[in-house]
Image: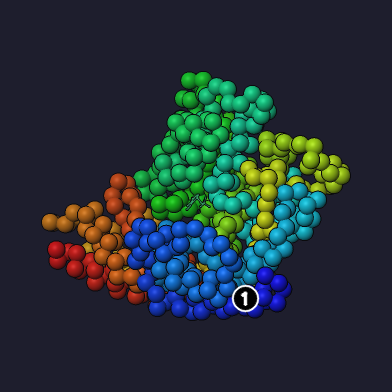
C-alpha cells in the first residue's frame, strides 16, 4: 500500500468508524450470532493474491459486524464500561503509524518521555500522593491491564519480602497474599503465575453492609499466618470492587501493612477514574500508604483498550525485581542512569507508544471534560438507583458511590428473588435495546447496571428503567 492508497483507504476507514458510532443506537447491543458463525463466514485459508481494500472493508460489514457486541452502545450497561473516544482512536492510529517499539528510552525517547509526563499529569489530575511522581522516587507506567499491574506488584512484593533472594532462588517457603473476599480474580492469577500459588491468596472478610475489607480481620489473619510460619508479602486493597464497587478502608489497611512491612497494592481498576472529581476523592484517602496503585483509563476515562495506569512509590524496588540485562540491550543512555527504561517495569520487553492516546484524550477533553464524563455517569446511576428504590418489588443491594447499581427483585410470597432476577436479566437482554450483567451479593443473585458508555444519556437510563420495570411485571406475572 503506497502513501496515496493509504491516504484514500485511511479516510474510508475513518468514515466507516464515524458511521458506525453514529449508527450504534439503531443496532441491537448484543450480537445475535451463534458460536462458530463468525468463523463460518471466513474463508478457510488466507488469500493467495492480495485483495482490494474496498472488498476488505465490505467484509467488515458482512463478516465481522454481525458478531460484534457493541460496548460503545448507549444501552451497554454490562460489566464495567470500556470507553473509547475519537481522540483516543486517533492517538492510537498515530502510534500504529509510527510503529515505535519503546522497550528502552534509547529505542524511542518520545515514547518513554511522553509516557512519564502523561502519568505525572494523571497523578496530578487524580491528586495522587507526591511519592508516585517521577520527580521523586516513584513514577508511573502504562500496563496493558490491571491484571498485569497486579502481577508486577506481586513480583515486586516478593522481591521485597524475600529481601532480594527471590530473584535468584525463586519462591522458597510460604508467602501469602491478602485481599478481601471481593478482590478481583486477577490477584489469584498473579499469585499463581508468580509461583506463590493461588491457595496462598487469603480472602479477608468484609463488612456485611459495605462489602469493604474488615481491617481487624486482616490483622488477625496476618498474625495467625506469621505465627504459622508464613511470610506475608502483599495486601491488595480495592477501590471499587468488581461485583459492587465497594471501597476498602485504605487508611486502616495501610497502617497495618506498614506495621508488618507488607507491600500494599491498591487496585482501582474501574473506580480510580472518579478521582478526577474532587468530591469523589474521599475514596482515595490513605493512598500515601500504598506501595503501588493502578487504574484503567480504558474502563471509564474515554481511552481505548489497552491502557492501565500503574504507579509505584519506589521505582528502584520494581526495577530491581524485574530487570534482566542482556548484552544486546546495553546502551549509553541506560548506563548513564539519566533515563527510564520501561522494559524493566513490565512483563514483556517490547511496548507500543500508548501514551499518545492518553495525550490526545487529556488535551481534547481537558480536566473539565473528564470530570463532566464521570459526574454524568455518577448522576445517571444515582437517578436509576432512586427509581429502583421507589419500586417496592426491587431492592438495591449495595452502596453505589460510582456509576454501578446492583439491584434485584425481592424475595416475596411466592417469589424466589434469585430465580426471578435471573429471569428478568434474561428477558431484558433478549430485547436487544440494553445489556446488563449479574453478580452475587451476600450469596443472592443481583443485576448490575454500570453506566459509562460515552453516548449514554439520562434518556437511555430512563429507557433502561422502563424496560426493566415492564419485564419485571411480566416475570412476576409468571
Ligand atoms: N481489578 C478490578 C477491581 C476490576 O474490576 C477488573 C476488571 O473489571 C480488573 C482488576 C481487571 O482489569 P483488566 O481487564 O484491566 O485486567
Residue drawn where x is 53% and y is 59% of the image:
46
Asked where in the image residue 360 lies, by quadrant, the reply is bottom right
Asked where in the image residue 434 lies, by quadrant, the reply is bottom left
> 432 or 216: nearer the eye?
432
Q: Locate the N terminus by quadrant.
A: bottom right
- Near mark 1 (Cα within 10 A), the count class, few <14, some 14-19 or many ≥20, is some
Residue drawn where x is 34% and y is 75% of the image:
463
Count of numbered circles in the view: 1
| Image x and y of residue 4, in percent | 70, 77
Rendered position, 234 above or below 287: above
Rendered image coloring scheme: rainbow
- Element type at mark 1: helix
> 8 or 19: nearer the eye?
8
Does residue 110 appear in this view? yes
Does residue 390 appear in this view? no
346 relative to 476 in the view: left or right: right
402 relative to 389 in the view: left or right: right
Residue drawn where x is 45% and y is 50% of the image:
241
| Image x and y of residue 26, in percent | 40, 78
> 394 or 143: nearer the eye?
143
| Image x and y of residue 159, in percent | 64, 32
Rendered position, 319 above or below 275: above
Rendered position, 358 above or below 62: above
| Image x and y of residue 84, in percent | 55, 67
Tell whether circle 1 marks a residue whose Cβ is less than 8 angstroms from ligand 1: no
Say which residue label 1 marks: 9
327 relative to 74 in the view: left or right: right
Name of the residue lying farthest toward the left = 414
Amino acid at each position: 500500500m503506497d502513501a496515496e492508497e493509504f491516504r484514500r483507504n485511511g479516510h474510508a476507514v475513518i468514515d466507516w468508524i464515524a458511521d458506525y458510532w453514529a449508527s450504534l443506537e439503531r443496532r441491537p447491543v448484543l450480537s445475535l450470532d451463534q458460536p462458530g458463525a463468525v468463523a463460518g463466514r471466513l474463508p478457510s485459508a488466507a488469500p493467495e493474491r492480495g485483495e482490494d481494500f474496498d472488498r476488505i472493508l465490505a467484509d467488515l460489514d458482512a463478516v465481522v459486524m454481525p458478531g460484534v457486541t457493541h460496548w460503545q452502545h448507549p444501552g451497554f450497561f454490562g460489566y464495567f464500561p470500556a470507553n473509547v473516544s475519537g481522540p483516543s482512536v486517533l492517538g492510537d492510529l498515530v502510534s500504529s503509524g509510527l510503529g515505535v517499539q519503546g522497550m528502552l528510552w534509547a529505542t524511542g525517547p518520545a515514547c518513554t518521555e511522553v509516557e512519564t509526563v502523561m502519568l505525572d499529569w494523571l497523578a496530578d489530575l487524580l491528586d495522587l500522593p507526591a511519592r508516585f511522581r517521577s520527580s521523586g522516587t516513584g513514577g508511573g507506567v502504562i500496563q496493558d491491564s490491571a491484571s498485569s499491574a497486579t502481577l508486577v506488584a506481586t513480583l515486586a512484593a516478593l522481591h521485597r519480602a524475600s529481601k532480594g533472594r527471590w530473584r535468584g532462588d525463586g519462591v522458597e517457603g510460604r508467602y501469602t497474599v491478602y485481599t478481601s473476599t471481593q478482590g478481583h480474580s486477577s490477584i489469584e492469577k498473579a499469585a499463581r503465575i508468580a509461583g506463590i500459588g493461588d491457595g496462598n491468596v487469603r480472602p479477608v472478610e468484609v463488612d456485611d453492609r459495605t462489602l469493604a475489607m474488615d481491617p481487624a480481620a486482616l490483622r488477625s489473619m496476618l498474625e495467625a499466618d506469621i505465627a504459622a510460619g508464613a511470610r506475608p508479602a502483599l495486601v491488595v486493597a480495592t477501590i471499587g470492587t468488581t461485583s459492587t464497587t465497594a471501597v476498602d478502608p485504605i487508611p486502616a489497611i495501610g497502617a497495618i501493612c506498614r506495621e508488618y512491612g507488607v507491600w500494599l497494592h491498591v487496585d482501582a481498576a474501574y473506580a480510580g477514574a472518579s478521582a478526577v472529581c474532587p468530591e469523589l476523592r474521599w475514596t482515595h484517602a490513605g493512598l500515601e500508604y500504598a506501595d503501588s496503585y493502578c487504574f484503567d483509563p480504558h474502563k471509564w476515562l474515554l481511552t481505548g483498550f489497552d491502557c492501565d495506569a500503574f504507579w509505584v512509590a519506589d521505582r528502584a524496588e520494581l526495577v530491581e525485581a524485574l530487570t534482566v540485562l542482556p548484552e544486546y540491550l546495553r546502551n549509553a543512555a541506560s548506563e548513564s542512569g539519566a533515563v527510564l527504561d520501561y522494559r524493566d517495569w513490565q512483563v514483556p520487553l517490547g511496548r507500543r507508544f500508548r501514551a499518545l492516546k492518553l495525550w490526545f484524550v487529556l488535551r481534547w477533553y481537558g480536566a473539565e471534560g473528564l470530570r463532566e464524563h464521570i459526574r454524568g455517569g455518577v448522576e445517571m446511576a444515582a437517578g436509576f438507583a432512586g427509581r429502583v428504590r421507589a419500586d417496592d418489588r426491587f431492592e438495591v443491594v449495595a452502596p453505589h458511590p460510582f456509576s454501578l447499581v446492583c439491584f434485584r427483585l425481592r424475595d416475596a410470597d411466592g417469589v424466589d428473588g434469585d430465580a426471578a432476577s435471573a429471569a428478568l436479566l434474561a428477558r431484558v437482554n433478549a430485547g436487544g435495546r440494553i445489556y446488563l450483567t449479574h453478580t452475587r451479593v451476600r450469596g443472592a443473585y443481583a443485576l448490575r447496571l454500570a453506566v459509562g458508555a460515552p453516548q449514554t444519556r439520562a434518556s437511555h437510563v430512563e429507557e433502561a428503567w422502563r424496560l426493566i420495570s415492564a419485564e419485571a411485571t411480566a416475570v412476576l406475572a409468571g
